[in-house]
Image (tube, grey):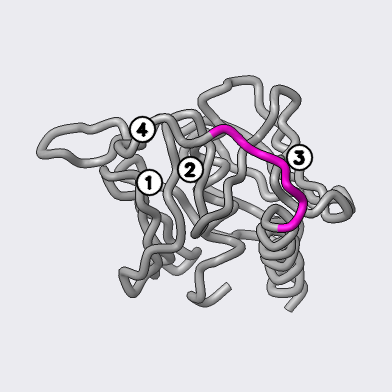
Amino acid sequence: MNNRRHVAQLRMAAVVGVIVLAGCGSQAPSPSTANTGTAGKNGEVHLTLITFQLEDAQGRPLTMSAVGVITSPQGPWGRVHEDGTVTSPDGALRGKLLPTGSVVDAQGSELATIADDGSAKVGAKELHFDADGKLVGGDPSQAMQLRATDPGARRIAMLVLIMAELSPTKQ
């Protein structure tokens, strides 16, 4: 139950952030390319799994290990796979990053697009992590901080954030 509340709070922070972006006039950099995935064989996405932590304004983290396992303070949240698939702890599909950069939920509905640099477009709204790892384009009162030593973590962290915030699949 606490895990659901935490994910719901993260979801609300991102949704509010997207809404605030529309009214605040801030401009995030545009995604640099439509092909946001590193294409592997047959045009598939290949992600390099990187350890990172996404922390909300209350200091509650979602942490990803070097093997893609994601945990919240309440326990397992899911897993990111090298092919861009995101699953729940029981292996059920949450969504996927496609070679085009589109992020789709388990039903195939597009939620967002993510560029190689980790910037995302959700409808007409844009989000990105700044040089210090702060989410830009979100509600300032619902701050989100990316903590990672590798700049490549931005793209995978944005994928996790979008899946946690916008995917209608079970939490």
Q: Is residue 108 left or right of residue 12?
A: left
Residue ID at (75%, 73%): 5
In the rendered view, would you say 65 is above or below 90? above
Q: Tell which circle, 3 or 4, labels the residue nearer the N-terminal end.
A: 4
How far apart marks 1 and 2 lie (CA) works out to: 6 Å
Q: Which residue is mark 2?
A: 68
Q: Nearer the viewer, mark 4 or mark 2?
A: 4
Q: Tell which circle, 2 or 3, labels the residue nearer the N-terminal end.
A: 2
Q: Is residue 108 left or right of residue 18?
A: left
Q: Which residue is mark 1?
A: 81
Q: Residue 161 at what x, y percent from top left?
A: 59, 52
Question: What's the magenta bit mostly, secondary-structure-wise?
Answer: loop
Mark drawn on residue 33? 4
Q: Which residue is mark 3?
A: 145
Q: Tell which circle, 1 or 3, labels the residue nearer the N-terminal end.
A: 1
Q: Nearer the viewer, mark 1 or mark 3?
A: 3
How far apart marks 3 and 4 lie (CA) works out to: 24 Å
What's under tag 3, amino acid-wise? Answer: Gln
How far apart marks 1 and 3 lie (CA) works out to: 22 Å
Q: Tell which circle, 4 or 2, labels the residue nearer the N-terminal end.
A: 4
What's under tag 2, amino acid-wise? Answer: Gly
Q: Quick one: 138 or 154, which is closer to the camera?
A: 138
Count of all numbered marks drawn on residues in the image:
4
Residue ID at (76%, 46%): 144
Residue ID at (45%, 43%): 114
Q: Tell which circle, 1 or 2, labels the residue nearer the N-terminal end.
A: 2
Quarter holding residue 42: top left
Q: Are marks 1 and 2 in contact (CB under 8 Å)?
A: yes
- Near mark 1 (Cα within 10 A), the count class, few <14, some 14-19 or many ≥20, is some
What's under tag 1, amino acid-wise? Answer: His
Residue extent of the magenta highlight: 23-29
